[in-house]
Image (spheres, rainbow, N blue to C red):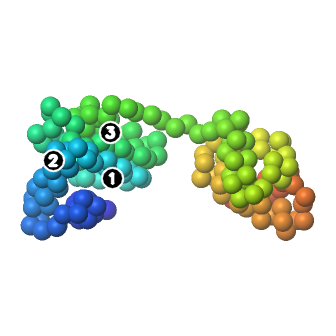
Amino acid sequence: MSVMEFYRQLCAVLGVEGRGGKLGMFRAIQEQILCLYYEKKQPLLVVDKAQYLSTGILEDIKMFMNYNYDSVNCFTLVLCGEPHLNSPLRKPVHEVLRQRITVHDNFNGFTDAEVAQYVLHKLFCVGGSASIIDQAALCAVHSHSQGNPRLVDNLMTDALALGAQMEKKSIDTEVILAAVSNQNLS
């Protein structure tokens, strides 16, 4: 995404007109953030897949956070992304932005027990039961996904489809390994 696309999207989310090029949009966004702050409606800006943000966008986010906001926090910023988001944030050019990050958490994946809870919870949500998958299969899911929720989801979706094709009564390690092979996770 370009800096201008970022500005246009931010204007749309905040309900302000994106006119006057970058400078005009910047001012409109600043005014709206301040207005919301004074109305006691502190905006929350959540950026998913932030590892793909360009240096230009990160610089402009820093400018939003610096402008007249030293004494107050006019909005909350949440940057979500893959672990390599840390790399650009460590660059000296982003020191000021990094200093404004008050909570920094690196998700290292679910533990073996958390994968089991996650899978069983999702099964319960769709009316399934714990008997549909055995404990060894749950351990295999963790082992091959390293606890990454997206990989767990993909692996389990594939395993359920394969289990049905194989006419299995429950998902066992054999089915998980077949799904691992399908997903190229081995």
The answer to whether residue 77 is above or below residue 170 is: above
Which mark is first along the chain, 2 or 3?
Answer: 2
Of residues 184 and 41, the one drawn nearer to the viewer in this rendering: 41
Taking the image as drawn, is residue 100 in sight?
Answer: yes
Taking the image as drawn, is residue 133 in sight?
Answer: no
Quarter of the image where one finds residue 78: top left
Amino acid type of the residue that numbered disc 1 sits on in the rendered structure: Leu
Give the quadrant of the N terminus: bottom left
The residue pinned by badge 2 equals 34
Q: Are marks 3 and 2 in contact (CB under 8 Å)?
A: no
Quarter of the image where one finds residue 26: bottom left
Q: Which residue is located at x 26 percent, y 34 percent?
A: 100
Amino acid type of the residue that numbered disc 3 sits on in the rendered structure: Leu
Q: Are marks 2 and 1 in contact (CB under 8 Å)?
A: no
Q: Rounded to the nearest whole Å, what is the CA distance between mark 1 and mark 3?
A: 11 Å
Q: Position of residue 7 (x, y in %)?
A: 22, 60
The residue pinned by badge 1 equals 53
Q: Nearer the viewer, mark 2 or mark 1?
A: 2
Of residues 174 and 149, the one drawn nearer to the viewer in this rendering: 149
Q: Is residue 39 left or right of residue 175?
A: left
**Dot 2 crowding, Cα within 10 Å, few <14, some 14–19, many 20+:** many
Q: Nearer the viewer, mark 3 or mark 2?
A: 2
Q: Position of residue 13 (x, y in %)?
A: 28, 61
The residue pinned by badge 3 equals 89
Helix, strand or loop at mark 2: helix
Q: Rounded to the nearest whole Å, what is the CA distance between mark 3 and mark 2?
A: 26 Å
Q: Are marks 1 and 3 in contact (CB under 8 Å)?
A: no
Q: Which residue is located at x 25 percent, y 38 percent?
A: 97
